[in-house]
Amino acid sequence: MASEVERRIIGCLNQDARKSYREISRETGISVPAVIQTIKKLEKMGVIKGYVPVLNPEYFGFGLIAVIALRISQGKLLETQKKIAEDKRVVAVYDVTGDWDSILIGYFIDREDLNQFIKQVLSLKYIDRTVTHLVLNVVKNDPKIPI
């Protein structure tokens, strides 16, 4: 379980991961050496897995976001999910409860790109069915966990 010090430091990094140790120290009231030590510890433990910019997908030509539900048969869930996750357009793959076995989120250039992807997925041996939902408007898409 995260300590209060860790939560305060991560809160600063969530606002801007490019902040200096000194800025984080100033904002949290935690000494610079303690900030450095805590961040290094969290990185080593795999709590902080990396630092990436938050991008606008449309700038890179991705005009469609799709949420796709999958029904996967014959106990081949993980094998099939791993295969699908290799596609660079897929940004998330989840095991879920309910009527579907898996949900994935993908970014696509246009309808033809999405169409090609769906046909590729449906051609996989253990995919029984898919349902695709197009995202019409992004109200919130925040990669930060609520700490």
Image (cartoon, grey):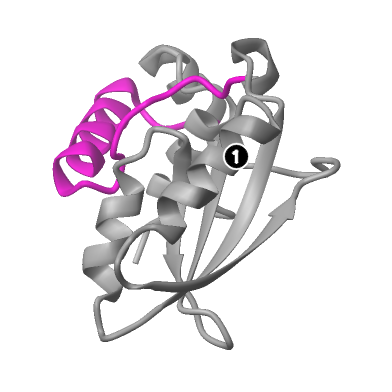
* Residue 30 image offset from top left, x and y in percent: 41, 32
Give neighbour class at mark 1: few <14, some 14-19, many 20+ (Cα, 10 Å): many
Does the stretch in magenta take in 45? yes
In which quadrant will I find the C terminus? bottom right
| The one of 114 and 146 positioned closer to us in this rendering | 114
Residue drawn at x 68%, y 28% is: 110
Q: Is residue 77 magenta?
A: no
Image vertical order of residue 60 relative to residue 12, above or below: above
Res 51 quadrant in image: top left
Which residue lies under the disc numbered 1? 114
Name the amino acid type tagged 1.
Leu
Residue 80, percent across and down? 28, 64
Q: Residue drawn at (59%, 54%), measured in percent from left and top?
A: 146
Q: Is residue 110 left or right of residue 108?
A: right
Query: In terms of secondary structure, where does tag 1 sit?
Result: helix
**Residue at the (31%, 31%) spot, across then down:** 50
Q: Nearer the viewer, residue 119 or 33?
A: 119
Instruction: Please determine whether, in this image, residue 110 is positioned above or below residue 146.
Output: above
Please give left or right for residue 63 compared with residue 45 in the image.
Answer: right
x, y percent for residue 93: 43, 57
Relative to 27, say whether 46 is above or below.
Answer: below
| Quarter that holds the N terminus | bottom left
Residue stretch in magenta? 28-55
**Image point 56% across, 24% down: which residue?**
54
